[in-house]
Image (cartoon, coloured by chain):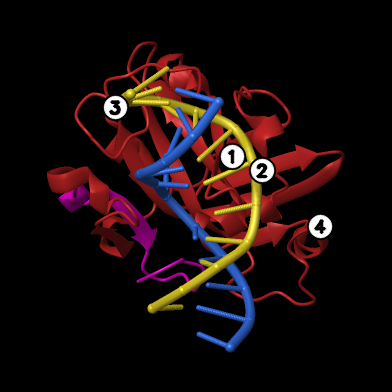
Chain colours: A red, B yellow, C blue
Amino acid sequence: MGKKLNREFYENGKVEQVAQQLLGKILVTNINGELCAGRITETEAYNGRMDRACHAYQKKTQRTEIMYGPGGFSYVYLVYGIHHLFNIVTNKRDFADAVLIRAIEPHTGIEHMLKRRGLKAINPKLCCGPGNAAKALGLNNLHNAVDLTGDLIWVEDAPILKSQHVVETTRIGVDYAGEDAKLRWRFYDSRSKFVSKR
DNA sequence: TAGGTGATCTTG
DNA sequence: AAGATCACCTAT
């Protein structure tokens, strides 16, 4: 079992660097005693100060307030009335950045993930795509603003992914952000089958 | 490629 | 108070 990432990990470095460093790390949830874990294979970075695609872009609201707090907290919200998306707040207080977890490679507690997703057998879609990943891990709006240095949701350290295996490309579903949609702030492990879109 | 679904934010 | 919008997914 790897060491739990501490606040320092989340608060230091640019959000696009932290998003990249999170690849290969192990995301763990322990919801209602159901322990689940998987290796992070795909992330996206969002920056509240200069990125129009970020919900917190130049505005603090009730929803985005958590991103203005310290790093290492969860930001979970509902999109399209259906899907909960799990993000990790990064950077220090007043710097509203976050990393969206878009896919994981299931690893522990697969039976719980299958049940939550209504699937019989493991397949690459089990936790690919941010909506599917959050659902498989049992995350919903109850898990917003959770401290990731606690024992409900956390990330365990693992060796950093070699840069030759990291693909950097544009983010999904942010066309409305104009020029910022061109930022290559989506990162994934080129070797993994568990990635939402190539 | 369309449609489901509801919280959030903006406008009036 | 109402309307538009939305960091998605599944099935036709």
The circle drawn on residue A112 is: 4
In the picture of the structure, the residue carrying the numbered disc 1 is: A156
**Mark 1: amino acid:** Glu
Give the magenta-colored segment's residue range: A181-198
Residue A195, x across and y down, in percent: 46, 66
How far is the residue under mark 3 from the one under mark 4?
Answer: 36 Å
**Mark 2: amino acid:** Val
Residue A79, x across and y down, in percent: 52, 46
Compare marks 2 and 4 and give the one earlier in the sequence: 2
How far is the residue under mark 4 from the one under mark 1?
Answer: 20 Å
In the picture of the structure, the residue carrying the numbered disc 3 is: A57
**Mark 4: amino acid:** His
Mark 2: which secondary structure? strand
Sort mark 1 into few (<14), some (14-19) or many (20+) by Cα contacts within 10 Å: some
Mark 1: which secondary structure? strand
Tell me, yes or no, whether dots 2 and 3 are on the same chain.
yes
Question: Is A171 on the left-hand or right-hand side of A128?
Answer: left
Nearer the camera: disc 3 or disc 4:
3
How far is the residue under mark 2 from the one under mark 3?
Answer: 29 Å
Q: Chain of mark 1?
A: A
Compare marks 3 and 4 and give the one earlier in the sequence: 3
Mark 4: which secondary structure? helix
Quarter that holds the N terminus of chain A? top right
In the picture of the structure, the residue carrying the numbered disc 2 is: A28
Nearer the camera: disc 2 or disc 4:
4
| Residue A108 drawn above or below residue A16 | below
| Residue A132 drawn above or below residue A77 | below
